[in-house]
Image: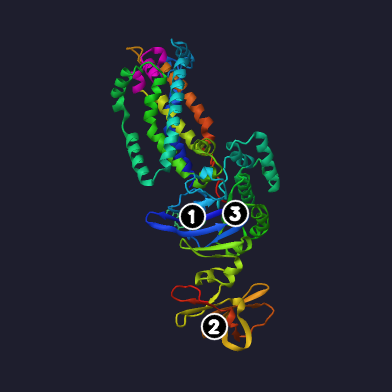
Amino acid sequence: MIRTRNIWIIALLIWSLSPLFWQVYTSFCSPESLIQPLSNSGHRWTLDNYRQVLTADPPFWRYLLNSAIVGISSTSLTLLLAIPAAYSLSRIPAKLARLVKLLMLGAALFPYVLLFLALLELARSFNLGNNLLALSFPYAALSMPLAVLLLASAFKDLPVDLEEAAKLEGLGLWQRLRWVLIPLVGPATASTSILVFLFSWNEYPIALTWLSRSDLLTLPVAIARIAGTSVYSIPYGPYAAATVLGALPLLALVMIFQRQIVSGLTQGAVKG
Amino acid sequence: MSLILQDIGRRVGRKWILRHLQLEVANGECLALLGPSGCGKSTTLRLIAGLDLADEGSILIDGQDVSKVAAVDRRIGMVFQSYALFPHLTVAANLCLGLRVRGISAAEQQHRVASVLALMQLEEFADRRPAQLSGGQRQRVALARALLRDPLVYLLDEPMSNLDAQLREDLRPELRRLILNGNQPVVYVTHDQHEAMAMADRIAVLRDGQLEQIGTPQELYLKPSTIFVASFIGRPQINLLPAQSGIVTAIRPEDVHLSEEGISCRIIDIEWLGTSQLCLLDSPKGKLRMLCNSQIKIPENVKVKWSSEKEHHFNSESGHRIN
Ligand SMILES: Nc1ncnc2c1ncn2[C@@H]1O[C@H](COP(=O)(O)OP(=O)(O)OP(=O)(O)O)[C@@H](O)[C@H]1O
Ligand SMILES: [Mg+2]
């Protein structure tokens, strides 16, 4: 039983991690060794790819910073709007809530790529192009349905007694949210934030069309540019190095939030 | 009277889950709301607390109509059945939260929390989370929170139902000392008639959202106004004899005595209860319960009787008492 389960897990890990390992491997290979994978020439391993990526103009950390700015601002904006919305959604009559959830689910499932022309038009008329912070408007809007649905079910799962106790203690609506409800949906908020951050970190079509100044590009666009710098060859090595560098912050983020995501904070809230 | 419910009613959809409820509770008085599950006890408390709004009637606290006042502003100290302690906060922070949002200075908060912790013998748990406390300790924290609210009315919703029998008995005097001797009206919900009799000055028996009878424990025990109250109050349960010409006669097991002559019965079963024993008898009038001293040796066939003034008579149609 346990043996077969282990085999499944290992197979799954290989399935999902092997492209990553391939990418890491590639990022440390010299171009020559990539072309002739079996030759045993002396300069197989190299940091050149990283050096090239980090010293380009603008340097790679600039894109990391851009993406971080966009990620943080769109995550914040999403939470700022989604938390009150989710709270209300969890407190309105069940029938109405079901209808709203259905609509949101529809919005969440809509292929957003179809929107990007319209969004571009909006960006043009409101002068939002080439502005990192402005990018958080479409990102927050696109993440909103999913974020609201996730958070609403978290609010719904809280024992009603807790909010009622807070009411009787004299806490007004905002105080209840601030001191009782939001801390209790912390784990759900953390996982929602990660999803939103991930989306904005990886988003390509909108970033491609809204941003054109090379010092403002976000990671996916920048990486795609590296891949397309030359017509004659594809720079696999630098491309892989850029991908690895771009993935590291995400990895760190998930590690940091892991504990919050899984912690069962509501344990022991109600009876014994 | 400082808590008055005037003809309140609560409707869910088209169904009334509470109707025509009239209650008055004086300062320092403890009123127990007693009744079977689903009879509307918690609903009544929620209406008083303002967690739900009454669909008819009005609620007066200290002479002021609070029917339209939000729960946040009602100054109610409530102990929930689940205790509803904030799981992410320590005991001290749980107690502090309300004081802080009500704008009490930090020094004063410290002082009040410390003194209530001392009062409840909870000092050593100040830095623990609710999850790290036992049921009894949680109950004390919930009580401490209600005390700190400095309320106009105390509401307790089955505060002991999550505790074992032993602990309940230990906590009863403590609870009486802390809350019931205060100067506020106390409404105490329970479905345990024994607890109600032990804690309350008066008991209101509810049935299907309606008030069945209200009175002191003695009144309810000695003069139950309906068959329902008669069988709900007093353990072992009262004997209901089969109706004769529209009248049900009821007699308490403790009023049935062995005697030389009387109704001859056969013993079916005996439960030994320590100081007393409960005999189940098969009589010409149906099954009878008799409570007698456990010293007595009971033969197979016995004769029993009771004095007629101990009998209760009820109309078999309406269930109401006939005097
Ligand atoms: N929100 C609601 N919607 C529909 N019915 C409700 C609602 N709240 C309560 N009821 C009904 O009202 C009746 C009284 O409920 P209540 O919670 O007051 O009972 P209770 O006396 O406290 O019972 P228990 O001893 O089990 O706690 C029940 O029949 C319950 O099903
Ligand atoms: Mg109840």
Q: In this rendering, does residue B235 appear at all? A: no
Residue labelled with disc 3: B185
User: Label 3 is found on which chain of the structure?
Assistant: B
Q: Residue B230 appears at what percent x and percent y?
A: 54, 71
Q: CA distance from mark 1 to mark 3?
A: 18 Å
Mark 3: few/some/many CA within 10 Å (<14, 14-19, 20+): many
Residue type highlighted by circle 2 = Asp
| Disc 1 residue type (three-letter) | Thr
The residue carrying mark 1 has its beta carbon less than 8 Å from ligand 1: yes
Q: CA distance from mark 3 to mark 2?
A: 46 Å
Seen at 44% across and 18% down, the residue is A66
Q: Chain under label 2?
A: B
Q: Image check: A102 left or right of A8?
A: left
- B166 is within the stretch colored magenta: no
From the image, tell me which residue sits under label 1.
B43
Q: Which residues are magenta?
A: A205-227
> Which residue type does callout 3 highlight?
Pro
Secondary structure beneath disc 2?
A: strand
Q: A68 or A136, which is in the foreground?
A: A136
Q: Earlier in the sequence, mark 1 or mark 3?
A: 1
Q: Nearer the viewer, residue B68 or B267?
A: B68
Residue A205 lies in quadrant? top left
- Please state the total of marks drawn on the protein image: 3
Is label 3 in a helix, a strand or a loop?
loop
Q: Which marked residue is nearer to the observer: mark 3 or mark 2?
A: 3
Question: What residue is pinned by disc 2?
Answer: B282
